[in-house]
Amino acid sequence: MKAIVRDDIISLSSFVSAEFKYKCYLELLMKAGNYCFLDQVKRFIPSNQVILKGMTENNLISTENINKNYKYVYLSDTAMKYLCLKDSDKDYSDVEKNKISVVKVNKYPSEKQLFSSAYKFHLMVMGEELIDKVSILKSLEDYIYLKELKATKEKYNEWFKKNSEGIKKKKEELQSLSNELIDLKKIIYDINTDIFNAKPSNNESVELINKTISKYNSYFSDKENKRITKEKEINNFEIKFNIVVKKNAEIVIPQVEKAKKVFENMYNISKIIARIKENTLEFIIFDLGTFKTALGYIKLINKINALNLGYKNIKIIIYSYAEHRALNLNKEFLDAAKKKRGALNTLKNYNLRINEYDTGQRPDFYVNANKIYDSIPDFEVEVRPDFYYMEAYKEYVTKGEKSIKKKDRKVISDIIEKLKNE
């Protein structure tokens, strides 16, 4: 196996170390969101001291203090250049390395960014799949393709390429056969003309001529029948092929794009991981310091339900750094489920009382119960305790000045300066 060394983007030693020693760790950190706590690396990655030292010495990661006991790790500019440009076709040999531009990782992330990345880093280190955005959206795309076309997107593309090329080849063969028939028809015509102009000497000659014409006509007829059969086969196959292609263009692709937008917005904005596994929508909530209400999360779930993706079950998974916070949100979800059961009982009891003179009009309490029942989907909810060890991080991050947004720090600094001058 050959590897291309990109010493045009970063130093040779840093590239070699990144490519052959630390690639998996760098990619893991980038997928998680570019940050993790130093203590997480020490907890979950074997030989962590050697790895941390090597990545630091090669300018691939940096660390920043939360306090004297805790630090967080983030990807350096060198690492970002490696990850973003290592597969680029562009040659940067004529550009100074410090002038090569890539997305920079903020040295001081928001509290929300830091904890979101730390949660995802933990899950991916522990082998959890479908945590990063790229894999979630790829899995969603394949799920829809399998549901609609019985094949993943990759398999569909292979099928499309193979069959479009196959149709083209068969049409070329059909055209070749048609050309052959044109030539044969001309030959038969010429023979018929020659025979018509000739003067047979006897009856045997006439019989021989007729047999020759008959053989040519029979040969032509067989060829023509083969051409017609082949043309019908191609047309029938092409009709079926075009039906699938049309379904992909008019139904599958729009559905994929619409679903991706919903899932991606939840990932980017709400920091929610929504994924479909084994016909179940898993709705993963990360506690980043502020929770929505259970009904607020249910509204987001209903946005996904409105896509009609065909999953059978909904599972809500709550992750928090503090047990009491997770249990409080869990109780809200259980109360919502109880509210739905109460609404169902109201509907059932009323329906048992109506009689043949029912006008179809429903009282307000019935309408309200129906709205509640329809707005709360069936679900199961689970609290997972994996991140309770992060409560100490949360306490120090929240107290630390670096958790304050940059623009807010400036405002505070200006106020302090103003007070000093008064």
Image (cartoon, helix red, strand yellow):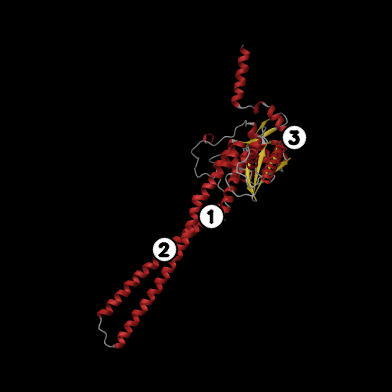
Between the residue at mark 2 and the residue at mark 1, the CA separation in whole angstroms equals: 24 Å
Callout 2: few (<14), some (14-19), or many (20+) C-alpha neighbours within 10 Å? few
Q: Nearer the viewer, residue 35 or 13?
A: 35
Amino acid type shown at disc 2:
Glu
Amino acid type shown at disc 3:
His
Between the residue at mark 3 and the residue at mark 1, the CA separation in whole angstroms equals: 47 Å
Q: Which of 272 and 90 is in front in this view?
A: 272
Quadrant of the rendered image containing residue 193? bottom left
Closer to the eye: label 3 or 1? 3
Give x and y (percent) for residue 101: 52, 36
Between the residue at mark 3 and the residue at mark 2, the CA separation in whole angstroms equals: 71 Å
Amino acid type shown at disc 1:
Tyr
Describe residue 17's horizontal placement relative to residue 215 as left or right. right
- Residue topped by disc 3: 324
Identify the secondary structure beneath mark 1.
Answer: helix
Give x and y (percent) for residue 250: 49, 50
User: Which mark, by number, is residue 172?
Assistant: 2
Identify the secondary structure beneath mark 2.
Answer: helix
Give x and y (percent) for residue 362: 62, 41
Count of all numbered marks drawn on residues in the image: 3
Q: Sequence order check: which comes first, mark 3 or mark 2?
A: 2
Q: Which of 15 and 388 is in front in this view?
A: 388
Closer to the eye: label 2 or 1? 1
Identify the secondary structure beneath mark 3.
Answer: helix
User: Which mark, by number, is residue 156?
Assistant: 1
